[in-house]
Image (cartoon, rainbow, N blue to C red):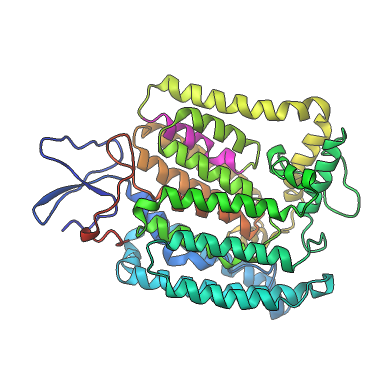
Amino acid sequence: MCRENDFRQPVGKGERADRRDGPLVQCHDRGRKWVHIGNPDVRHVGQLLLATYPLFWFGIGKKYPFLLLGAGGLSIGAWFWGAVSLAWVGALFVPRTWQALVKTPRGENIFNAWILLGLVCTAGFDLLQWLRFRDLGYPIPIGLLIADVALGLIVWAKRRDPNLIALACLVAVMHKVGSVLTFPLVAERSDMLPTILQALERWMTGGKAYAPPTGGIGQMHYLPLTWMSYSPAYFLNMDPRWIGVFYLSLLGLLAERWLKETKDSLGAKLVVLWFLNPYLAFRHELYLDFFWLSIAATTIAAMMERPGWTALFSGLTLVTMPWAWIVAPFWWLLASRSAPWHRLASVAAISVFVASIVLTPFLLHERSLFLDAFLLPFRLIQRGDYAGELSFGVAALFYQLGWSRILQPLQIIMLMTFGVVGLTMRRRGAALLGLMVAAFFLFVILNPFIENYFYLASLMMAALALRPLSAQHEEAQSIPSDLGGHEY
């Protein structure tokens, strides 16, 4: 039996195996011939994520709990997360040293363990945020805690249900609804959404969206579609978090439909863990739901080799968050992988044109304000003190060692290297997926400023990218159940 069986499909008699999407492994099972279609790199990322998923949501307390250790606590935290992150990067490139940990049945046990841990921590984080922010008007979340327990018991009972993705999405949406109903939106905890609302009000009344803020909130430095995606909240005079609930629901529907034929696959399990992520539940006031949705839609369009839709979606995503600039070239390569080179150029050109249409009004009418606001995070990075969270990533350690100035050059070198490699394997779709996902994670790990929620976009992309690409038109096929489709 073939050991690498994540992306296998039957090859009929007289058919030719297509080598576009990675190395082929011929093997036999019960008299049938199977062909391995896919790049092991993307599997390695997914397998490593399954083995280490809680690392991406443990660092929820800025400098806590290391601050409790006294004067040297922050130094301990920087070394801890730096060492863990560097070990994770090393493991990504040496998969043979740890892959046995996630093989069936260990992989199934790990998946169940992370579900249980996530459900318990969701309730714990709800209690924690009440304790931390009760002075801001947060009430005791009794109803939310009861819902956490009830929903947790349902998820645990249904953890082997084929519709677990839909259930996990429903739980995430219901928890966000409960959080919106329970906890007030206060700028003292996070001023992201209040800043967006102020920018929307100015823009809708003919003012300048990027003008200096008033009312003690921070400067609005987001790209246009981030805050424009909350326009319905302005028109309906509603809490903007309800708009986030809507986008999160759409994301769940899209992910479930995309992975419905591979519900027992590694990608499906990572999607379940994404929606049951206690950090996602904890940060009910985040502003990135539309960005996650656009990341998912663009990745799926590129995997399906739909150049028109990829160009449109990637263009819109480029003016939503700068993180999209990292993966946009890989989207363009994926969408044109079986077409001539001029198709790649046209996809990129249309994408940039779409982004330009959105940016032009702001560059014409409030250029200096827009550029000053957009460059604000980069100026903060240059101050020399690490202001981010003590969480997964190497920034805190590099700042402590005095190496912070090499982080951005390392990011650029990594992206250029991955980009050149991507051009050389343009027609190998699964190989491009592996490069894209790895580049996204490595860029965030090397970022000079880290917030835990930075990883939510790359975690979703990795899960969706693990749906297999077929040899013909790269359409995903289900993994035969008798061949252990749930093996990792």
Residue 78 lies in quadrant = bottom right
Residue 369 lies in quadrant = top right
Q: Is residue 462 left or right of residue 56?
A: left
Q: Residue at x 59, y 68 (%)?
A: 79
Extreme residue in the top direction: 342
Extreme residue in the left direction: 31
Q: Is residue 272 left or right of residue 184?
A: left
Say if residue 144 shows up in the picture.
yes
Q: How many marks?
A: 0
Q: Say above or below: 475 vs 386.
A: above
Q: Which residues are magenta?
A: 323-337
- Judged by its main secondary structure, the magenta piece is helix
Q: Is residue 284 left or right of residue 237?
A: left
Residue 259's x, y, as percent? 40, 51
Viewer-closest of 202 and 75: 202
| Membership of 330 in magenta stretch | yes
Residue 424's x, y, as percent? 37, 32
Residue 15 lies in quadrant = top left
Residue 374's x, y, as percent? 75, 40
Residue 457's x, y, as percent? 56, 51
Say if residue 446 shows up in the picture.
no
Viewer-closest of 99 and 290: 290
Which quadrant would the N terminus be assigned to in this image? Answer: bottom left
Q: Residue at x 74, y 54 (%)?
A: 384
